[in-house]
Amino acid sequence: MTLRAALCALSRAVRPGGCGGLPLSRTLQVCGATIHASHPRQGSTYTPPPARYGGRHTVTLIPGDGIGPELANHVRELFWFCCVPVDFELVNVDSSLTAEDDINNAIMSIRRNGVALKGNLETNHNLPPSYKSRNNLLRTSLDLYANVMHCQSLPGVKTRHRNIDIMIIRENTEGEYSSLEHESVPGVVECLKIITRVNSLRIADFAFQTARQNGRRRITAVHKANIMKLGDGLFLECCKEVASGYPDIAFDTLIVDNATMQLVSRPQQFDMMLMPNLYGNVVSNVCAGLVGGPGLVPGANHGEHYALFEAGTRNTGRSIANRNSANPTAMLLASCLLLDHLKLPAYAHMIRRATLSTVTETRMHTADLGGQASTSDVIKSIRNAIQSTGPLTQSI
Amino acid sequence: INKVLNSIMCDLSLFQPLPAKYGGRHTVTLIPGDGIGPELLNHVREVFRFSCVPVDFEVVNVNSAMTSEDDINNAITAIRRNGVALKGNIETNHTMPPSVKSRNNLLRTSLDLYANVMHCQSLPGVQTRHKDIDILIVRENTEGEYSSLEHESVTGVVESLKIITRTNSLRIADYAFKLAREKGRRRVTAVHKANIMKLGDGLFLQCCREVASGYPDLQFDAMIVDNTTMQLVSNPEQFDVMVMPNLYGNVVSNVCAGLVGGPGLVPGANYGKDYAVFETATRNTGKSIAGRNIANPTAMLLASCMMLDHLKKSYFFSYVKNLCLNCKCVSSLQLHTADIGGQGTTSEVVQSIMKLIQSKGQLTTDL
């Protein structure tokens, strides 16, 4: 079993494009010293993602479960309203089916379009363990190795902490999420946590590139190398190697328990954080909680060839589904990240500004932020904000 | 004096003496550890001597710089002999080869201290962003991600094994529910990540549910670890007792410690079937503040109180505990150390605690 796992990891590691692959949209801006294996599609100029025809992009849309469908609808309506040149190709994935056809269709669609926007797909705990998490399948099949989440305190949202601005880079494909478990002796389960050199170098490189692009000064690697000496020790070693190639960016490390304690008492000290999969999950949720909750933070999953955008904390929101009370901010900001990726900054800026002004200035807050507005109220307010700033829109 | 005599009589009737009690005095192993450990444990000894607590400490030094395991084996033998220990954290040097296992971990696994209990309570007088927190965290202490089983079968690919067993999960769940019942708690929350680690955390969850069915008076629910940490940060008052495997326990206990005021305030206890080891809950070495007389002694003192409780010296326990709480109640910032925003030194805090003990009339040696 272990040999098979090792071989799987090895086959994943040996991949055309090698380490240090960059997301498509960031090629032009890189001026780092390291040389990377060249992307097959990139030349010296920007290559647009595929599925752009007649000036219009096609983006895969996976509504998901819970609040996903209603929020995806709102995004579509808003895009139509703002005349954004994006067409959505809707792919429904039914999470209750055990067959993998649905998710394979979705993966094929994303391969075709290059970009996707999705809601969270529910993982039913009662189904047998052979049924893998659909979200996880998506991420690993498309090799979306970097999850980026930017947590920022928004003025106008009441939180206990102020002035938080943390960017979290989380390894997205290996670590504890390898789904490799077995029960060799009844009653004793072994879960494998895989850390590979290739993936660790890749994610560290991505982090440092992103830091440079966004003008960040300091990266903190979060680990538990005092206990998992080989695993997290390897991760740490790779981070240090990559850090030596970026002398302008400060690099330090922190054990995960200390990191979470610091986050809770003094989150302003962190700038950018880099970590393997599970710690990334916990830390990103803590940060989301610190800035105001899961309804405010968008997340992006980047791979060498594809990009997938979603709400940062990947909640299904089953209990508030179809009640018109979900907070659309996270999904809308995720769609702005999507527009940035598609090199449509004007539209991205427009929608982002309107969304943020609704949250911070108009203070139209949904229930999760302590207000009483419904989702449609917030959307209407955003549309008004967009229309009032002048660009061409459809009539309301 | 009557009250004290009565309580002694009550204690004697139910008293099951632990080993290493001779002439009415207990012997407890003391492992100073590194960083702020030695100075804090000295203060504990001072306070104990001052309050005439019938406990003798057997000091066992463990040198974390040495690769040989003799030191830690001596410590383990001493704890086996005495049954109870009080320890500071022993540093784990990352630069040493992986064959040098974490000393703290070795202690816990050799003595099979399977339950780590941490009680996070908002203390009045300590300025925090959250109020009214009262969470009991029960964390599996021997297996899970801390099994130290790793290998590199292919160069550049490391596999770390996370072990979850049925017996240990049943054991820790049972401990959690018993503790909840004993302390009059209503609700136990299991923290897991079974949507991803279906077999592993799935087994843990299953065991918790089985045990929960035997305690119908206690409410049981389960929460995924990422949601838990987010809820802890926004709304920690909703949690009562939490039970979880090792790594999540580490993270969640540190988050809770941060919420109630920091690592200097919360004591932790590690219980096994035959032994008990007490220490600060967040197991910090405090290397950067060692020797500067600014460490917060509260966590270590409260840990020693928990130890006294374990030794069935309950009248001492409530006494000294009230003392520590009184120290926090005192609004004068002089009695807060730097980590909670004050300017007091460790020795000042300890002196004021001893003065308070004296003022309550208990028999003490001279200050």
Image (cartoon, coloured by chain):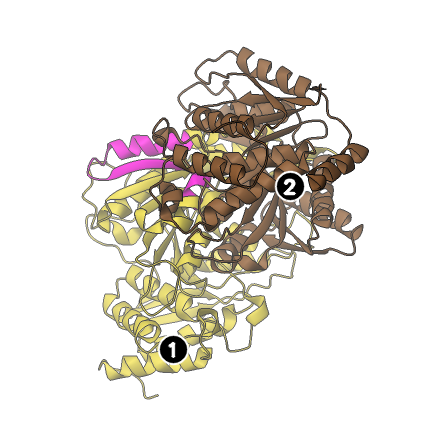
Picture disc at residue B236:
none
**Residue in front for this viewpoint, A145 or B224:** B224
Q: Is residue A283 magenta?
A: no
Amino acid type at circle 1 is Met
Image point 72% across, 21% down: which residue? B19
* Image position of B225 with respect to B367: above or below: below
Amino acid under disc 2: Gly
In which chain is the residue bearing label 1?
A
Residue A19 occupies quadrant: top left
Task: Residue B200: give its label.
Answer: 2
Q: For the residues carrying marks 2 and 1, which lies nearer the camera in this image?
A: 1
- Rendered brown, the chain in question is B
Q: Is residue A355 visible?
A: yes
Q: Is residue A35 left or right of residue A302?
A: left
Picture coordinates of residue B16, whole percent (x, y): 78, 29
Residue B338, placed above or below residue A350: above
**Left or right, B93 with reference to A248:** right
**Image quarter in which the C terminus of chain A is found:** bottom left
Q: Are both tags, 2 and 1, on one chain?
A: no
Residue stretch in magenta: A234-260
| Palette colour of chain A | yellow
Tell which residue pokes out farthest to the bottom in this image: A395
Residue with the mark numbered 1: A364
Label 2 CA crowd tier, 10 Å (few <14, some 14–19, many 20+): many
